[in-house]
Image (cartoon, rainbow, N blue to C red):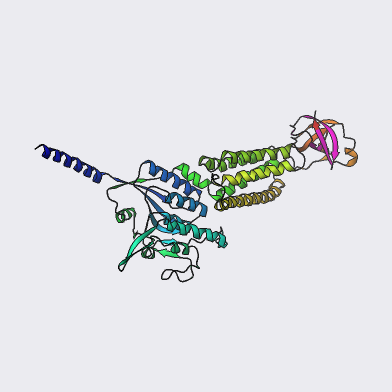
Amino acid sequence: MRWIRGLILVLSILAGHIRETFARETIVFKFDIAQEIMPGAWQVTKRAIAQAESINADYILIRINTYGGLVNTADSIRTRILNCRIPVLAFIDNNAASAGALIAIAADSIYMRKGASIGAATVVDQEGKVVPDKYQSYMRAIMRSTAQAHGKKPVLKGKDTVWIWHRDPDIAQAMVDPRIAIKGVNDSGKVLTLTTAEAIAVGYCEGEAENIKEVLQQAGIANYRIVEYHASLFDKLIGFFSHPLVQGILIMIIVAGIYFELQTPGIGFPLIAAIAAAVLYFSPLYLEGLAQHWEILLFIAGLILLAVEIFLIPGFGVTGILGITLVIIGLTMAMVEKLPDEPIRIHFLTPVLKAFVTVILSITISLVLSIYLSSKIIGHKQFRLALQTEQKRNEGFVGVEADILSGMIGKTGKTITVLRPGGKIEIDGDIYDAVSESGFIEPNTAVKVIKTMAGQLYVVKL
């Protein structure tokens, strides 16, 4: 009888374990990639997968609907998916084009809505033009390697078992290169894009589904609980300010603000706008780990050197050039993921080059527009500033003829405007153009003329 009671106890324990196993909910963590593949999408992906791992989710489900975006950002996303320890399901809810196709192929399983498509991954520039083959070669390689990462599966052919790729790498690279022809799939000389039925036929889709519920049913997942990742306001702001177009606009505001502040000393608003744009440019990138301390310090150091060159050193030389260089480096590197620990590779130089072009174009456009607007606004008769008003002799202004200037050396007076380094001074009741030889000089400061050059007086503070 004792052994019977022991057997009953063991069976009850096993039954309890079985009930617990079947009663346990399967946790499915879901998030969306339903926008352009920009740095904001990468930040959301990182946080979402980290959160899924922290709650020990059983599956990750990504709803994809995108026409593509930046290749380097898509590469970061697909690498994170491939290295994720949790099985990843991709639900293509209409479109997985270009960079979106790369992300979808990285998932362990793909499900597509009726009428959806995947493919068209040729690399193009911002105008939609196909870029040179060296870029296509890189895209072909990462598409091919992503497909190969899922390995091979056994297939019975007749009496033999053969191993074939779970996802054919040639089909992946045919989505990039129209020269790759695959018999029965893509023999038209066009870049490959697969419909839902075609993707199922070639093993690039596990099944057709109209919604998340059908996806999970086809994946054999029952008794599940969906935990959704919702982008916070902070995430949305990060995505907005991380967009290359917005970053370019902020750079233009920084440059234009500095330019107008130098052209119209004392107004203050252009400088405030430049500072605000700099904060909006660097803060989101810094909080997300994109901008490092040294990049921000380079930018600040560049501004300091420019200020020294403009306000303290007459002319424009090494200090100014170094300042501009540091500003450009700081703005450029802040756009790029932090430098890897290993030696820099070619694939890292591509986003650096793109960021550099964005910065240079933004600065150039900003300077051109600033100069144009300066001539239209500051020089307009209805918008007169102190340095643009007519200087009448009966108001104390005099010309700077050589005979007048020759006798000015050694005379003293006071500043009327700030000298940084140029401005206005008053000597014996007359007002003259003057340049500071001793750095920044505040208004109403006693000065002494030490030399004349090119129709201007050069003064030092007493």
Q: Is residue 399 left or right of residue 387?
A: right
* Quadrant of residue 110 within the rendered picture: bottom left
Q: Residue at x 38, y 44 (%)?
A: 52
Residue 350: give x, y in percent of width and height. 57, 53
- The magenta segment is 432-459
Q: Is residue 235 left or right of residue 16?
A: right
Viewer-closest of 454 and 112? 112
State the predominant SS element of the stretch in magenta: strand
Q: Residue at x 45, y 58 (%)?
A: 101
Q: Is residue 281 visible?
A: yes
Residue 309: give x, y in percent of width and height. 73, 39
Q: Is residue 327 left or right of residue 309?
A: left
Q: Is residue 377 left or right of residue 37?
A: right
Residue 371: give x, y in percent of width and height. 69, 49
Q: If the image is split into quadrants, where does the N terminus sit?
A: top left
Viewer-closest of 279 and 328? 328
Q: Residue at x 72, y 41 (%)?
A: 319
